[in-house]
Image (cartoon, rainbow, N blue to C red):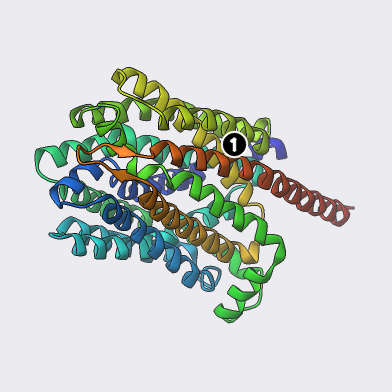
Amino acid sequence: MSSKQSTTIFSSYQKGVIALLAIVQFTVVLDFMVMAPLGDMLMKSMNLNAKQFASAVSAYAFSAGISGLLAAGFADKYDRKKLLIIFYAGFIVGTALCAAATSFHLLLFGRIITGLFAGVLGAVAMAIIADLFSFNQRGRVMGFVQMSFAVSQVAGIPIGLYLANRFNWHAPFSMIVGFSFITAVFIYAFLKPVTRHMEQKEKQNPIVHLLKTVSNKTYWLPLITTALLSIGGFMLMPFSTPFIINNVGVSQADLPMIYVIIGICSMITLPLIGKLSDRIGKLTTFIAGSILASIMVIVYTNLTPIPVWQVIVISALMFAGVMSRMIPSQALMTAVPKIQDRGAFMSINSSLQQIAGGIASVIAGMIILQQPDGKLSHFNTLGYVVVGVMVICVFCLQAINKQVFHKLHIQQEEKTELVA
């Protein structure tokens, strides 16, 4: 097999790893995303105002961010499989607490516990991908793993909404607990230890390792960019469902159908985006996605009552634009750190992503005003802020792209010299 073929063909084990990481991502994403479609139901059943609901969303993000920072020093010290299992178990416990919550404060506590463990899962998964897949494969791997967003819309959220409508809002969280437990068993049985990073360096004190990673100036711009990317993604999410229900006139009964159709469209486009980012370049794909996302965000946040099919088309295009930014940017970020810093960098990266998302949710809750009839005011203001952040991210990613390819060029030259 040629070297070119080896970078384009996945082994059966690699395919299994991709599937497991995608399922882990699916459960974590579903746990977070289900809060948005349940938003209107939660706000009404618990008599929550916009700020209280935003605090429930941001509590998860802030706790996830804190745990990411605390875990960063240890992320490269242990087998990544063990870390994945431990934090996934904690995630399951936190989600179970949400399922059992009977008041706003108990729900808030459950979201904090869930975030503490979920905040590290994404970083561990990203580090495993970077350890097991070459740079030229990672766009496609990210495309498949990020299909978790689409699958959550096609299956997870509609089923969750059905259970919520059939029983109560607790039911979707119970469903996630059961499915996650089964997934954890498969991870334990199938995934091999991931320890190559432990052979690359001498043992360091976790705090020293964390400070060394944070003080590396080449990591600063990528970390700042991650925070900006997260602000653009989180600001609209918590209030999107209350907006389309109360301002656009979509009924609660139509939500499952909307999520299913958008999810099916995403399942088709996400693998294509991953392949595209590997073929034409991750930066080019990101810029194209930013243009599409910016246009559709402005359209979406200024919607007035329109037919459901138009809401579906606009939402699907906006989601395609957002994912065309997420997949190539995440694939590019995996090439930034040295292998011995990869776990720490990914943990800090994930932490900043969550903290920035929490800040974005709080800001959104301060900007949004809910009128007595349930309608939201100033939602379009959020749209303009998001587009401004997207423009800044394009310039940041251009600089990161240059940094990554300079690094890869040096590595290639070193390999050539060794062969010679």
Vertical placement of residue 57 versus 393, above or below: below
Left or right of 20: which side holds 410? right
Question: Residue 338: image x %, image y %?
Answer: 68, 61
Whether residue 217 sits left or right of residue 63 in the image: it is right
Q: Nearer the viewer, residue 145 or 387?
A: 387
Residue at the image point whose x is 60% and y is 52% from the top? 225
| Quadrant the N terminus occupies | top right
Query: For the view shown, which residue lies furthest in the bottom direction?
Result: 205
Task: Residue 140 in the image: state x and y as whole percent.
Answer: 56, 37
> Which residue has dot 1 on it?
9
Q: Above or below — where is 321 with respect to 348?
A: above
Q: Is residue 3 above or below residue 27?
A: above
Residue 2 can be seen, yes or no: no
Of all residues shown, which one is farthest toward the right?
A: 420
Q: Residue furthest front?
A: 372
How crowded is the residue under tag 1: few (<14 C-alpha within 10 Å), some, or many (20+)? few
Q: Is residue 159 above or below residue 262?
A: below
Residue at 61% across / 30% down in the picture? Answer: 288
Q: Quadrant of residue 388?
A: top right
Residue at disc 1, secondary structure? loop
